[in-house]
Image (cartoon, grey):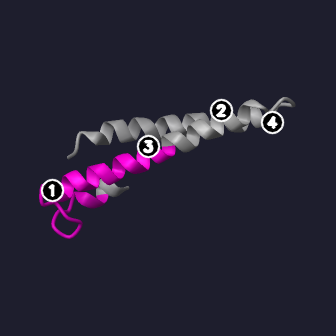
Amino acid sequence: MPGLRWFNTACLLCSNITLEIGRARGKRPAGDAVKTWFFATTVLGSTFLLGQLLAWRQLVARGVYLQTNPIVPFFIF
């Protein structure tokens, strides 16, 4: 499995944390920080997607395709 999976997992978890912080800040009267937290969420989510693309490229380079390995569906989800 690609080493990027841990980095991707960290990005995904951090994006969830920043999303929840942004939601909590949005309920306060001075919700200016919401944009900052949602921007951070977007950046982390985009980084996750880019990491997934790179991880898939690593798998394909090793000859692992969706149809050839039963572990691949677990990697997707």
**Residue 59 coordinates in the image, percent (x, y):** 20, 54
The first of marks 4 and 2 along the sequence is: 2
Residue at coordinates 78% horizontally, 32% vertically from top-left? 32
The answer to whether any part of residue 5 appears in the image is yes
Q: Amino acid at mark 4?
A: Lys
Evaluate if marks 4 and 3 touch, with contact meaning CB atoms under 8 Å apart. Answer: no
Disc ID at residue 27: 4
Helix, strand or loop under label 2: helix
Q: Amino acid at mark 1?
A: Ala
Label 4, label 3: how many angstroms apart (C-alpha)?
A: 27 Å
Helix, strand or loop under label 3: helix
Given the current orientation, which residue lies at the most extreme right position? 29
Q: Which residue is under mark 2?
A: 21
Q: Which residue is under mark 3?
A: 47
Q: Quadrant of the C terminus?
A: bottom left
Assess whether residue 11 is covered by the magenta stretch: no
Helix, strand or loop under label 4: loop
**Could you classify mark 2 by the number of other residues whose Cα lies within 10 Å: few (under 14), some (14-19), or many (20 or more)?**
some
Assess whether residue 53 is covered by the magenta stretch: yes
Given the current orientation, which residue lies at the most extreme bottom position? 67
Q: Which residue is under mark 1?
A: 61
Label 3, label 1: how many angstroms apart (C-alpha)?
A: 21 Å
Label 1, label 2: how many angstroms apart (C-alpha)?
A: 38 Å
Q: Is residue 14 left or right of residue 53?
A: right
